Amino acid sequence: MRAMNRLWLLLLVIPLTLALAACGGDEEEEAATPEATRVAVQAPVIGGAPEAPAQVPATPVPAKEEVKVSEEDEKYGGSLKFIPNGGISGPDPIRGGDLSFLAALNIHDPLIAWDNDGNLQPQMLDQWKIENDGKLITLTLRDGLLFHNLEPVVPADIIQSIHRWRSKAVFGTFFNENLVSMTSPNDNTIVAEFTEPSGVFIQGLGDPSSPSPVMVPEYLAKTPKEDLMPEVIGAGIYKMVSIDDGVKTVWERFEDYNPRSDPASFRAGGKHAYFDTIEGLEVPEAQTRVSALVTGQVDFLDIIPPDFVGEVERNPELTALISQPGAQYFISFNLWDGSPFDMTEKGLLMRKAVQALTDNDEIMASFGPEDMWMTCASMWACGTRYGNENVNPELYNQKNIDQAKKYLEEAGYAGEPIILTHATGGGEAWTAFATVVNEQMKRAGFNIDFKVLDRAAMAAYRDATGDEGWHVSPTYMTSWSWRPIASRYSTYDLHGYDSPRMTAARLALTKEPDNVKMKALADEMQSVFFEEVPYVLAGHAFFLRAMNSDLEGYIDMPIDGVYFAELRWKSGKQQ
Amino acid sequence: MLGKRTAADHAAPVVRARDKTRWQRLYLLARRHPTGSVAVAVILLIAVVSAFAPMIATDNPYAIDTPNRLSAPSREAYFGTDHVGRDVFSRTVYGGRISLLIGSAVALSGVIGGAVLGLIAGYNRRVDVVLMRIMDGLMAFPGILLAISLIAVLGASVQNVIIALSIFELPSVSRVSRSTVLSLREQPFVEAARAIGARPHRILFVHIFPNIVATLIVMATFACAAAMLSEAGLSFIGAGVPPDTPSWGNVMAESRGFLHKAMWTIFYPGLVLAIFVTALNVAGDTLRDILDPRLRRQA
Amino acid sequence: MKAYIARRILAVIPVMMTVGVLVFVLLRVVPGDVARSIVGVEASRAEVEAVRESLGLNDPVHVQFSLWVGRLVRGDLGRSYISNERVISQIGKRAGPTLSITFFTELVVVIVAVPVGVLAAWRVGSIVDRGVMVFAALGFSVPVFWVGFILIFLFGTWAFGRSEPLLPVFGYEPLSSGLVPYLRHLALPVAALCLGAMAFLVRITRASTLEVLNEDYVRTARAKGLAEDRVLLIHVFRNAALPIATIIGLQFAGLLTGVVITESVFAIPGMGRYVVAAMASRDYPIIEGTVLIVATGYVLINLGVDIFYAYLDPRIRY
């Protein structure tokens, strides 16, 4: 009978909550947002701020002196429970498992890292030297580096790790053919010889995007790239104690980590692990995640839907962390031969029709409150090094249905079904994006077959070359300045984008030493992009993270991973 | 039925049922089962609203209006708007069509399919062995996986949801109809039919089938209710109807991340679903009371 | 009796074969494969193909099937393609949460539903009966995730004080970390799950009790002046218990396969969520292993119920 009472109670409570929610709606707008609970965390521009020197300097430029974070001993300790954005599964960056960004940031230490000013700094390295026009690159390791198994880091580990990474990373394609050899003349130096100028090698080692260049012991780095590394051993600030797929992972502070003496600056500099332990828990539902933070079951949430921003801000015990530029959403096409959007003249007209009909304001409004997204008329993420909204602004956000219809007529489109695929299980924002694109394309007369699949099935369809299973797919990528050239999604051959003009400009960009000319090449790539329409830009949705207000020292990373270095409990809390 | 009401029934003037018009009989039946009558009225009302959805809905259920997303219930949008600015009232009204379609199609196909299998199994020992083992296997197989597989093969659609849910229903319906057949087979009237040389399929369909119709109708009501709930569950898992298609379950599943901010998006479709399924369950109970001869005996 | 039991046990074999063939074929028909999940979304097709080859996924289906059956016969469920963990040990870790939820749900359901159902049948037609029936209809009318989120919302977002959360809104603590945390973590999922199950069992109990109440021997017992509570307890309930027990067994077995949604809502690391996640990455050995284990559990419970039934009611053993 108790259960019955509970039911009646519930039935009573629901209308009450509704009534209250309805009343609460009016007050909401008047109540001032508590200032303290919101932090718009603008990470330094990865890939360099627009004014930063673009090309890698021959030797590192010393970082500016920063106010050093007080290293009071009482700030060490305590534990942190967090919920990662993806699930919990094997973090091999080569595979791109759910945890791979998190592991790359916290379990591993980078050889080279970006600092607050957008410069590359040596991290595991003591020094690098680019000689002979960029054909000879020397890396010198810092002293006292240890892996989590307490073995010292030696050049053989680094060389093997770089080989494993370059075999998979898109960055590798820029220098793999030019690489003559990588050798170590002594126990802390690695010498790489190239036939062509290859400063991009250093860029790549400093880029934490997927797959991240992680440094592991030689025997692990020998794992074939088809297989998952059997252990997770890095040289970073936290070490992995256990991982239980789909449930949780436990990390501990790596007590033998030897931090640099220079101050912490973004991903570079001396890094500190303040927590004794970190526990990552898998919670699939957004509402459950937020409730878990509110009740104090966890202390930190990686990316949650933007609509929760008000909920988090209103709560004085929580801090909302808004990270720009977030994810870049776009409409991708099947460009293989035979698809209605293929690389032929007719396919181009079809793609231009989609470009013309797109109403970006309407699309982006579906992502949540207005301060959680932005439109951006640039292929390179707005606010990053090459972000430039002045290349072909008239081709973005056209909202021109009539023009779209004209293109369709020109292309001879007669209402053949267009398959728009979408995968379930990617969250409300993605589904909303697909829903809006679906409606917008219908307005211009596209006969859309809205095909909703599960993720694995969609991946299988997208693997197909030719007109198999899909034509259009609304999707997203994390935005970096370098990302568009480093991602196979955009300019690589994944969907059959085969463009001599784009390939030429891209290769030239990776080799160009001059700052101004690099910018011009980037703009050139953009104009090719707007003319050939390999995909249609939507806009940026910012990342919303949330944490307990008793935490401080958070360093934002504009990727789907949290960086736990320097994050700590305010003194005396949660010890 | 044992208490006061029996007395009241006896006190009523004794009029033979066949002396009355059809409407009078319906009225008497309704008076005897007030809860059931209310339930049937509710079902009819919701069915009519769904049938005339284009006239009743205030907006196109697919039309997006993102600047006005998650707006509270108002005179323009009775149930508010959802996360892409679609009118929740219209989606709920149109959603009735999809949900009722799924519910009734699953009830029909599941029950008819199950009944045919059950009849055959109940009458033919050899088929029985094979069929029942397969049904047991189906029953032991996690249904959600079956649904996810269908979506992966064919894509999300109303039709696939109906197929997946009908397969869920098959084993239990076939079991029940089989056991009914087994018990009926030994009844004197069936033996008599057999004795005068009636062929098996005639016995099956002329003598046995009419006797399980009542049970099947009741099962269909419950199957319909269960299917509508399962449809919501499938939408939650991502194996339901496509996201733009309004069904009650889908509207709820799509809005589950907005409970904190726009409760109306999940509350109203949920309320309508709850009312409808409750009515179905009550109607099913009433039907059983009316049709089940063993219960009729008490009155 | 022995022959009956032997027959029932033998019948398990074709059932499990059906399940095995079904899951194997289904996975081979479904597009998308584990190779893509292993190499990641940005890998090239050549890499996917290499992984397919190394896992033997390019072998003819009948070869794969016979290899799989061969391993099964040796009692080997294989290893996850992705984590390389033994399937059996992974399932072992996830069985605890699922069994706990299932057990406590069924426990609460039986404790509440059986007395309520008997009461409703005893006072059939009364206000109590109608109230119970309306409850039974209502309880089985809302999707479980709806109830789950409302509970999470009430106990979480609408916190009854953050410093002292009333109940944890997600997760699972094993019994080894203490009885109180174990039960506290189970409270909300069980509450969400038991509504529907309770409504169903109330119905069944009421119906079977009603049926017995109309039997002649009950009338006789009443006529000879036996106290009503004795009539109910000795004559009615003991006879009505049989179908009720069957349904409880079936329901328990059904819950085993039906807790996926509850596990997702409350982030409980159980078997249901595990198999759905494995489905998303097409990790065949895990899917096949979990389905076989769950189906075995289902079949064994049913077998137990059947035998129990036959033991109590000799007419069954024809």
Image (cartoon, helix red, strand yellow):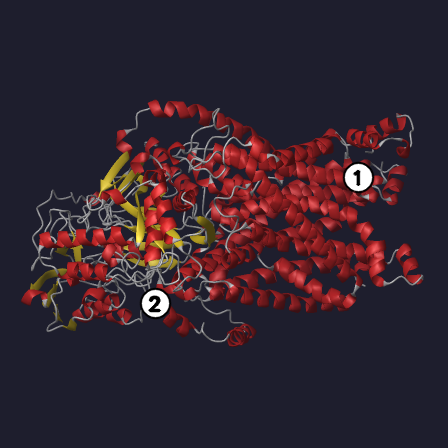
Classify the position of the C terminus of chain C by image quarter. Answer: bottom right
Which residue shows up at 13% across the image and 48% down it? A263
Q: Which one is in front, A169 or C191? A: A169
Tally of numbered tags: 2
Q: Which mark is residue A449?
A: none
Quadrant of the image occupied by residue A487: bottom left
Q: Which mark is residue B290?
A: 1
Is B132 or A514 nearer to us in this picture?
A514
Q: Is residue A70 left or right of residue C89?
A: left
In-front residue for pair C282/B16: B16
What residue is shown with label 2? A230
Answer above or below: position of A530 versus A204.
above
Residue A99 visible? The answer is: no
Instruction: Using a 10 Å C-alpha cutoff, classify the residue at mark 2 as few (fewer than 14 neighbours), some (14 to 19) or many (20 or more).
Output: few
Residue A300, image x and y in percent?
Answer: 33, 44
In this rendering, the answer to whether B99 lies above or below A419 is above
What kind of residue is marked 2? Pro
For label 2, the SS is: loop
In the shown orientation, is residue C253 left or right of residue B38?
left
Q: CA distance from mark 1 to mark 2?
A: 66 Å
Q: Position of residue A241 (x, y in %)?
A: 33, 58
Image quadrant where residue C4 sits: bottom right
